[in-house]
Image (cartoon, helix red, strand yellow):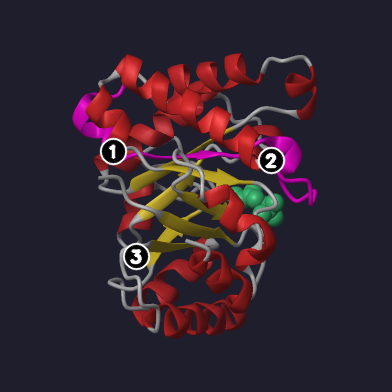
């Protein structure tokens, strides 16, 4: 049975001190939760990884980086490799976030390299996909997502693919306050699961965790998570306040 997960993406927010405080507060509150079956991940800035990884109990909260290099090592000034990330005790890495795709020109081919390096270093990728507003207006959302998955993930072997978490984040819903309706989310998640089934098999599709991201907050998490193919969320703004983040986890 696939795992239900709520993951935070702090993006470029929080100083180290603030990050440590927030991580501790989240951990404290998650520890009190009755339902321990929900995975909780925080996606934090690179420089926070070693420190936060040291102070949290990884049985309660897992840590994700927000990116990794598409190269294994060497003369790539400013880059951080999957191997380095793993060495801090981090378990996950967000790959292909729409902000990386648009502001840093990361294409599916580059993202595919990142996914493979992450897997080689025992990091679980949280692979983000999603269409732009214009693409949805023209009814191209399914083609876009299909291409992102085909070029980014679907050449992985079964065993490798089983480590992947998919996050569907319609770009028009990220940081805009506009959320996909529960119907729009379910329709796309169902489509993604069908693609996984077609490219792998029904069992793999059934075991794949597919998260929704894009203006997910305490007020709408419950109706989004109630859908059969929505297995949790990738939360931006609302993951920066412990109370909101916990309320979203409680929405299950
Ligand atoms: P918001 O929740 O702020 O819309 O961000 C979503 C996101 O990009 C998570 O990765």
Which quadrant would residue 238 be assigned to in this image? bottom right
**x and y percentages locating residue 41 in the rendered image:** 43, 62
**x and y percentages locating residue 47 in the rendered image:** 52, 67
Residue at the spot 66% in from the left edge and 56% down from the top edge: 220
For label 2, count other residues whose C-alpha is less than 10 Å away and answer few (under 14), some (14-19) or many (20+): few
Residue at the spot 64% in from the left edge and 65% down from the top edge: 218
Question: Residue 38, relative to residue 68: is it above or below?
Answer: below
Residue at the spot 36% in from the left edge and 20% down from the top edge: 154
Q: Which mark is residue 207?
A: 1
Q: Nearer the viewer, residue 134 or 77?
A: 134
Which quadrant would residue 217 be assigned to in this image? bottom right
**x and y percentages locating residue 50 in the rendered image:** 40, 71
- Sequence-first disc among 2 and 1: 2
Q: Nearer the viewer, residue 244 or 96?
A: 244
Left or right of residue 244: residue 74: left
Q: Which residue is mark 3?
A: 88
Q: Residue furthest left?
A: 159
Q: Secondary structure at mark 2?
A: loop
Q: Between tags 3 and 2, which lies in front?
A: 2
Q: Which mark is residue 181?
A: 2
156 inside magenta stretch: yes
Question: Residue 153, relative to residue 234: is it above or below?
Answer: above
Q: Can the viewer see residue 68 in this picture?
A: no
240 inside magenta stretch: no
- Sequence-first disc among 1 and 3: 3
Q: Secondary structure at mark 1?
A: helix
For label 1, count other residues whose C-alpha is less than 10 Å away and answer few (under 14), some (14-19) or many (20+): some
Q: Nearer the viewer, residue 5 or 125?
A: 5
Q: Nearer the viewer, residue 178 or 235?
A: 178
Count the labels in the image. 3
User: Quadrant of the image for the N terminus?
Assistant: top left
Task: Give the magenta-colored segment's residue range.
Answer: 155-180
């Amino acid at each position: 049975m696939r795992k239900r997960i709520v993951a935070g993406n702090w993006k470029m927010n929080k100083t180290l001190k603030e990050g440590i405080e927030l991580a501790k507060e989240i951990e404290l509150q998650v520890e009190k939760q009755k339902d321990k079956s929900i995975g909780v991940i925080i996606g934090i800035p690179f420089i926070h990884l070693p420190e936060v990884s040291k102070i949290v109990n990884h049985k309660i909260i897992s840590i994700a980086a927000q990116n990794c290099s598409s190269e294994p090592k060497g003369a790539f000034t400013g880059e951080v490799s999957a191997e380095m990330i793993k060495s801090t005790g981090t378990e996950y890495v967000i790959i292909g976030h729409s902000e990386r795709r648009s502001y840093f020109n990361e294409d599916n081919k580059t993202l595919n390299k990142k996914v493979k390096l992450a897997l080689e270093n025992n990091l679980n990728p949280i692979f983000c996909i999603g269409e732009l507003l214009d693409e949805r207006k023209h009814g191209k959302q399914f083609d876009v997502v299909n291409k992102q998955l085909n070029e980014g993930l679907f050449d992985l072997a079964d065993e490798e693919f089983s480590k992947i978490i998919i996050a569907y984040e319609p770009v028009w819903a990220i940081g805009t306050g506009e959320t996909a309706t529960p119907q729009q989310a379910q329709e796309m998640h169902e489509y993604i699961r069908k693609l996984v089934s077609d490219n792998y098999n029904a069992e793999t599709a059934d075991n794949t965790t597919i998260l929704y991201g894009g203006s997910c907050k305490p007020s709408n998490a419950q109706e989004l998570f109630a859908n059969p193919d929505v297995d949790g969320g990738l939360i931006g703004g609302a993951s920066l306040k412990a109370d909101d983040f916990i309320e979203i986890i409680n929405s299950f």
